[in-house]
């Protein structure tokens, strides 16, 4: 009876090893799949040992019972910058996140729980002149309000017509300037970035976007180059910080661990069959 109990425990321990390896493979596969995603931050699977304790008077004995998976850890290391020459392609060099609001049809004010944070700085203007990302979510500026860049400027005194928007530029401190006509330059907006005490506590919601959590703490907002916040590099996009070579090596190691657990499980099954046949 004791031997059958031991077999049951072994099955449970081996199963936790298989679950852990499978979880690790899923995290690595997600990193590889998003290697080309702008602003993507790779994850690392995390595990903890399981123990079973028996208390007998003042003596404590702890027996290993396998492993369990915990929340993957995000790596927020800087990704490489790719030149695009797009005036609204923005990369953050250093700490900080762009702040995204909810779709503009819901109103101008975005509640704190509706904000998203990203390092993907691929932006463009919608038909109403709002600065939005590829999913149509507005980039928020001062006061956590959407940034709008008018297509028409001041009236030209010579012909009586408003001047058309001809160029947009963003400096390293996040100031947005628009050029109307040939040389009429107007500051039309200011980008604010968010910084966190513990960025590793952010919740990954996909598409290189994150939500704040109690673990991350509330965001601190400021213009680029303020305090510990990084600067803006216009005409560049931050790529994923995934290193394909490292991820493939990790995948091979994890597959070997998975296969090893599978062989151990098969051995236990064979032993159980032999005992049951007696």
Image (spheres, grey):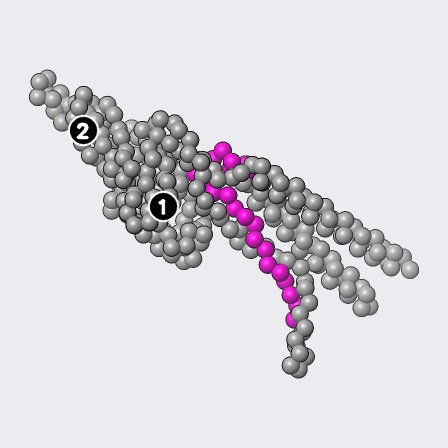
- Image quadrant assignment for residue 213: bottom left
User: Where are the magenta residues, as a range?
Assistant: 32-53
Q: Whole-percent x and y of residue 146?
A: 27, 40
Local SS, label 1: loop
Circle 2 is placed at which residue position? 185
Dot label at residue 178:
none
Camera-side residue of 261 and 80 = 80
Residue 257 location (% of width, % of height): 69, 48
What residue is shown at x 13% (from left), y 20% (from top)? 161
Asked if 243 appears above or below 214 in the picture, the reply is above
Work out how far the residue at label 2 is from the one at label 1, CA to CA, in angstroms: 28 Å
Could you tell which of marks 2 and 1 lies nearer the N-terminus?
Answer: 1
Q: Which residue is mark 1?
A: 96
Q: Callout 2: 10 Å neighbours few (<14), some, many (20+)?
A: some
- Position of 232 with respect to 272 (left or right) is left
Q: Is residue 92 magenta?
A: no
Q: Is residue 152 visible?
A: no
Q: Quadrant of the N terminus?
A: bottom right
Q: Residue at x 18, y 21 (%)?
A: 182
Of 53 and 243, nearer the camera is 243
Contact between marks 2 and 1 (CB within 8 A): the answer is: no
| Residue 259 image offset from top left, x and y in percent | 72, 46
Say which quarter of the image contains residue 177: top left
> Which residue is outermost to the top?
159
Q: Position of residue 131 (x, y in %)?
A: 30, 34
> In the displayed image of the protein, which residue is found farthest to the bottom?
57
């Amino acid at each position: 009876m004791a031997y059958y109990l031991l077999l049951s425990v072994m099955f449970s321990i081996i199963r936790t090893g298989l679950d852990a390896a499978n979880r690790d493979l899923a995290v690595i596969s997600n990193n590889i799949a998003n290697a080309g995603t702008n602003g993507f931050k790779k994850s690392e699977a995390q595990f903890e040992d399981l123990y079973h304790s028996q208390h007998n008077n003042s003596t404590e004995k702890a027996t290993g019972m396998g492993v369990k998976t915990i929340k993957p850890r995000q790596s927020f290391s800087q990704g490489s910058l790719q030149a695009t020459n797009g005036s609204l392609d923005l990369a953050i060099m250093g700490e900080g996140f762009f702040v995204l609001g909810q779709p503009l049809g819901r109103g101008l004010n975005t509640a704190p729980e509706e904000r998203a944070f990203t390092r993907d700085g691929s932006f463009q203007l919608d038909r109403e002149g709002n600065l939005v990302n590829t999913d149509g979510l507005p980039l928020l500026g001062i006061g956590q309000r959407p940034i709008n860049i008018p297509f028409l400027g001041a009236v030209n005194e010579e012909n009586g017509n408003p001047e058309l928007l001809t160029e947009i530029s963003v400096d390293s401190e996040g100031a947005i300037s628009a050029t109307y006509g040939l040389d009429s330059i107007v500051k039309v907006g200011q980008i604010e970035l968010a910084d966190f005490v513990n960025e590793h506590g952010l919740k990954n919601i996909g598409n290189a976007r994150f939500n704040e959590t109690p673990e991350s703490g509330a965001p601190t907002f400021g213009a680029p180059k303020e305090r510990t916040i990084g600067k803006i590099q216009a005409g560049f996009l931050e790529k994923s910080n995934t290193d394909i070579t490292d991820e493939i090596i990790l995948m091979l190691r994890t597959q070997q661990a998975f296969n090893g657990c599978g062989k151990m499980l098969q051995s236990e099954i064979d032993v159980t069959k032999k005992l049951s046949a007696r």
